[in-house]
Image: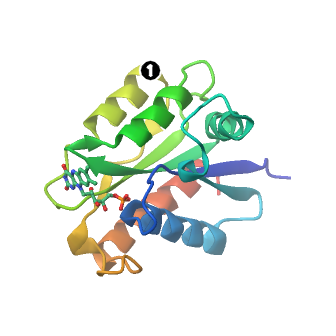
Amino acid sequence: MKKQKKIVITSTSMSESSRSRLALSYCEQIIMEFASDNITCDFIDVRDISTSYTSKKAKGYIKKFQKADAIIIGIPIHNWGASAQAIDFLSNAIDSEQIKAFTPCVLIGGAGSDKALLALDGVVRSLLTETNAMILGKPIIVSASDTNQDKTEISNNVAERLEKVVEKMLELLGD
Ligand SMILES: Cc1cc2nc3c(=O)[nH]c(=O)nc-3n(C[C@H](O)[C@H](O)[C@H](O)COP(=O)(O)O)c2cc1C
């Protein structure tokens, strides 16, 4: 029997209608549709956590994130970097002792501008230098030109990039 593997999808946006969360939901849909039964998916939403990281719920989320076999993180871009809430969560969750070596990670940025390509370099650096996680490809930026006005639909271009990276993640998980 194949070993059970868990993909943890983590949204760090505080926004009700979030571009990064929309892209994460699409990833979840693809996984549900195409992954084998031994792969499960957990969606954690940092919006549910109060500002304190000492609560039981926050600790539970951090543990889930750290125990994941693969991680997909959605990060809003504020002032040309990851938002303060995203940094806050990741600073608590990125721990070299806890995150398994070679955990595949995908980074998705929600942005206003399609010129925000370098904005997640700080998160990339933290993951690559503080853990032995493996980042799959470059961050996927979902900008205003990649969603409709209501932020309920993503462009074909972003959808295709998400499909490819999720496919690679499933392959690495042995699916
Ligand atoms: C305080 C603040 C700063 C922002 N700074 C940038 C920025 O530097 N570059 C950019 O492209 N968009 C910027 N935006 C727009 C957000 O990136 C955009 O709203 C995006 O959709 C946020 O991701 P989310 O929808 O997943 O929350 C900013 C928004 C806010 C509220």
Name which residue lies at 34% across and 35% down. Answer: 124
Q: Is residue 99 left or right of residue 113?
A: right
Q: Using a 10 Å C-alpha cutoff, classify the residue at mark 1 as few (fewer than 14 neighbours), some (14 to 19) or many (20 or more).
A: some
Which x, y percent locates residue 55? 69, 34
Q: Which residue is mark 1?
A: 130
Find residue 82 and report its image quarter. top left
Q: Please, is residue 14 above or below residue 17 in the view?
A: above
Name which residue lies at 63% across and 24% down. Answer: 98
Observer-nearest residue: 76 or 158? 76
Would residue 119 be visible to someone looking at this image? no
Question: Which corner quadrant of the figure contains ligand 1?
Answer: bottom left
Name which residue lies at 26% across and 58% down. Answer: 111
| SS for dot 1 | helix
| The residue positioned farthest toward the left in the image shown | 115
Q: Is mark 1 within 8 Å of ligand 1?
A: no
The type of colouring in the image is rainbow
Identity, as a three-letter code, of the amino acid under mark 1: Glu
Which x, y percent locates residue 77? 28, 49
| The residue positioned farthest toward the front in the image shown | 51
Q: Quadrant of the C terminus?
A: bottom right
Which x, y percent locates residue 117? 20, 50
Which x, y percent locates residue 87? 40, 35
